[in-house]
Amino acid sequence: MTEPEILSAPLVLEFPFSRTTGPVIGAFLTGLREKTVVGMRGADGRVICPAVEYDPETGAPLTELVELSDTGTVTSWTWVSQPRQGQPFARPFAFALVQIDGADTAMAHAVDVADATEMSTGMRVRARWAVEREGLITDIECFEPELAR
């Protein structure tokens, strides 16, 4: 019995387009560069932050930009005892969901505390802005306990 012939064809995987951030994500990132946090108001009045183009519940386009505070409340958190390369800190820190004041949703970000005993759900935090900002989520270097200032 002869072996069946194995057929093959070259495959080039490419994405021959570029994507812009658009008016909503662009406004969010521009705001960060200017040390301002913005969200989007949904038809039901909820404010979603970070800003998104479409309501996550209804799929309706969102168009009303809302300026928010740079303070918020930790709604959930986890301790990173052994950070990996590329994480916000090379030492232990917390990742948290932070509900920015004026928003109805939370954003994930790092919280800079010395150890896990300094973290709690419900704690108040404030953004620590990067010295040099570029219009990226890392323009918020991290959050820190509000009393730290």
Image: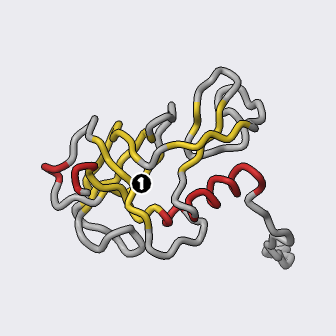
Instruction: Locate the C terminus by quadrant.
Output: bottom left
- In the rendered image, the vertical position of residue 109 relative to residue 13, given as above or below: above
Where residue 91 sits, quadrant-wise, is: bottom left
Task: Judge from the rendering whether residue 23 lies leftward or rightward of residue 101; answer left or right.
Answer: right
Identify the image's colour scheme: rainbow, by chain, secondary structure or one colour.
Answer: secondary structure
Extreme left residue here?
Answer: 117
Q: Which of the pair 95/6 is nearer the observer? A: 95
Q: Which of the pair 49/96 is nearer the observer? A: 49
Identity of the residue drawn at 73% across and 59% down: 21
On the question of residue 48 being in view, the answer is yes
- In the rendered image, the vertical position of residue 106 relative to residue 8, given as above or below: above
**Secondary structure found at label 1:** strand
- In the rendered image, the vertical position of residue 75 relative to residue 126, given as above or below: above
Which residue corresponds to mark 1?
109
The number of callouts visible is: 1
Identity of the residue drawn at 17% across and 61% down: 114
Extreme top residue here?
Answer: 44
- In the rendered image, the vertical position of residue 135 relative to residue 102, given as above or below: below
**Amino acid under disc 1:** His
Identity of the residue drawn at 77% across and 52% down: 23
Question: Where residue 147 sits in the image (x, y, percent)?
Answer: 22, 50
Instruction: Locate the N terminus by quadrant.
Output: bottom right
Where residue 53 sits, quadrant-wise, is: top right
Question: Where residue 20 sits in the image (x, y, percent)?
Answer: 78, 63
